[in-house]
Each structure stands twice: as structure tokens, then as C-alpha cells.
Image (spheres, grey):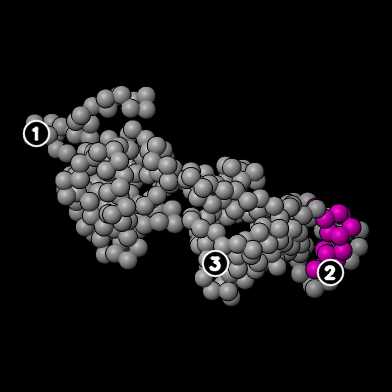
Amino acid sequence: MLVGGRLYEPNEGIRVNAKANDEVRQGELVLVATPLGNLGDISRRALEILETADVIYCEDTRHSRVLFSAYELAVRGRLQALHEHNEASLCEEVVERVRGGAVVALVTDAGTPGISDPGSRVVAALAQANLRVTTVPGPSAVIGALSISGLDTERFTMEGFAPRKAGERARLFAEWVRESRTIIFFESPRRLATTLGELAEHVGTRQVAVVRELTKLHEEVVRGTVSEVAAVFAAREPLGEIVVVLAGAAPEAAPDETTLRAALIEELRGDVSVRDAAASVASTFGVAHRVVYQLALELRANGGF
């Protein structure tokens, strides 16, 4: 079968034990990305794996049955539940299945397993056991939202779901004040207005994109400053799955030489070595150590402190 430009043979994944001259099946765990909403987004290779895997662990078997029904995939009793509440207890079971030669597929309700979804613990267990883990890449709410946000895509950080408690959110948002990378996080519809309002208190003028119902019929992207978008959602309660993409902090202007010299003099008056003074100032201002160290040497040589 030709799938995605690669020829897949029916017995691929089987290796021959030359000594015993019998076939030994090579087990593996396959993380299969599934559509975020539009069922047409699944790949042909993903369908092949779901059709042929020995067992398929699903975040919600009822949800996965919709996909199987749409593509007329045989269930044959292969669907098993694996979610946030039982993942830890099932790790050893999955390890033993793969060690025994089974091809095990893992899917979540939507998107890529293990990314703010069940799967990461199982993968870690397989890696620890030195067993094969592979992926059928595809839909990802994180990458999808980032790609259409209109914000910088070169450097970004994924923060998962925003904390539920106000105090934890406040501490996290305070850290984001200086974060220069684009920030991506998930939020529930009922908490979105509150979260954006609190975020506006820290970075109200920064650009943000709220991506709702990605790939679905009512897909929506609301862009603007955090304060502007917070006002939009304070006036209406959204529905569906939500990804928030927040612009990073603008780079701070590099300190001039006068500022660096003044900081070095203050450090050196504290009876510390030139090297330690330079290291402290370089760290404080985010300047290359060699530049600050050279200034410190010049100050000491000229008696400037």
C-alpha cells in the first residue's frame, strides 16, 4: 500500500530471527494524532494503524467510536480506556503488551496524544523499558492555533492549561511579564473572561489571539490587545475548545556603557573580585560577560572605583 509517498507492506513491523528461522513480531507503541474537529483531517497512515493495531487505548472510547464509525474501521473489541485518572496504573500493562510483540495505538479525543492530554506517562514508561515508541503526526491544537495567530512563531512556549486558582494564575502571569517567547495556553470557556481580565492587569497592551473551535464549523479567531480581547469575552460567554496565543515581551533596550560602569562601580565597592562583579552585572543586564569584564578591568586599571 502506498501511503504518504512511502510503500507499506502488509507485514511491515515483522522481523525474522535468523537463528530460529521463525518470525518474531516487533512490538511498538504508536501515538496517533486524530482530528481536532474536522474528520477529514486524519491521515491515511493514521487510518491504517487504527485498522491494524492489536489494541487501541483511547481517552474516551465513546468519542473514538465516532471516528471508527465514520471511516468504517473495525473495532473487534480493541478499544481500551486510558485517561488522566488511570494512565499511571496502566503504564505497566502497556509496557507488557509491547514487550510481548503487540502493536499498540494510543489516541486522545482530539489532536496529538501527550500534549496536555494523556500519553506522556506511558511514553516515559516505554522509553524507560527501552521499547519502541513512534508517532503518526498530524493535528495539533498548539501548532494550529500558533500558525494562524498572526504572532511570532520562531520561539514559543506551551504552558498547558491556565491554573484554576487565582493566586497561581497571578504568579504565572507575573513571570510572563518578562517572557520574550510567544506563549500558548489552553483555557475553558467559563474561565476565559476571568483569565483574560487578570492577564490584562499584567500585560494589557500586549497582542493576543484567542482561537476557538479550531477546524470546526464555528471556528473563530479574536485578535487585539489583551485588554481589548478581555472586554470582548467579558460581554459574551464563548463555547467550545479554546487556545490562547499571547505575544512575548518586547526585547529590552541594551544598557549603555555608562549604566554598566555605574553598576560595576557599585559592585566593586562591595569588596568583591573583578570577575565576580562582572558576572553579577552581566547577569543583571543580560549582557555578554566578556564585555562587562573588559569594562571592569579598565575601571580597575584607571582607578575608576
Specify the label residue 266 is tagged with. Answer: 2
Query: Does the magenta run of residues contain 37?
Result: no
Specify the label residue 191 is tagged with. Answer: 3
Query: CA gap, disc 1 to disc 3?
Result: 58 Å
Left or right of 128 on screen, residue 153: right
Q: Residue at x 39, y 37 (%)?
A: 40
The kind of secondary structure element at disc 1 is strand
Q: Residues within 10 Å of mark 2 (few under 14, many from 20)?
A: some
Q: Quadrant of residue 33?
A: top left
Q: Decide: is 281 above or below 47.
A: below
For label 1, the residue is: 22
Q: Position of residue 141 (x, y in %)?
A: 48, 48
Amino acid type at circle 3 is Arg
Looking at the image, is mark 2 or mark 3 nearer the viewer?
Answer: 3
The kind of secondary structure element at disc 2 is helix
Query: CA gap, disc 2 to disc 3?
Result: 47 Å
Amino acid type at circle 2 is Glu
The kind of secondary structure element at disc 3 is helix
Instruction: Kindly report the secondary structure that dominates the magenta region of the rendered protein.
Output: helix
Specify the label residue 153 is tagged with. Answer: none
Q: Which residues are magenta?
A: 254-267
Is residue 127 in view from this perspective?
no
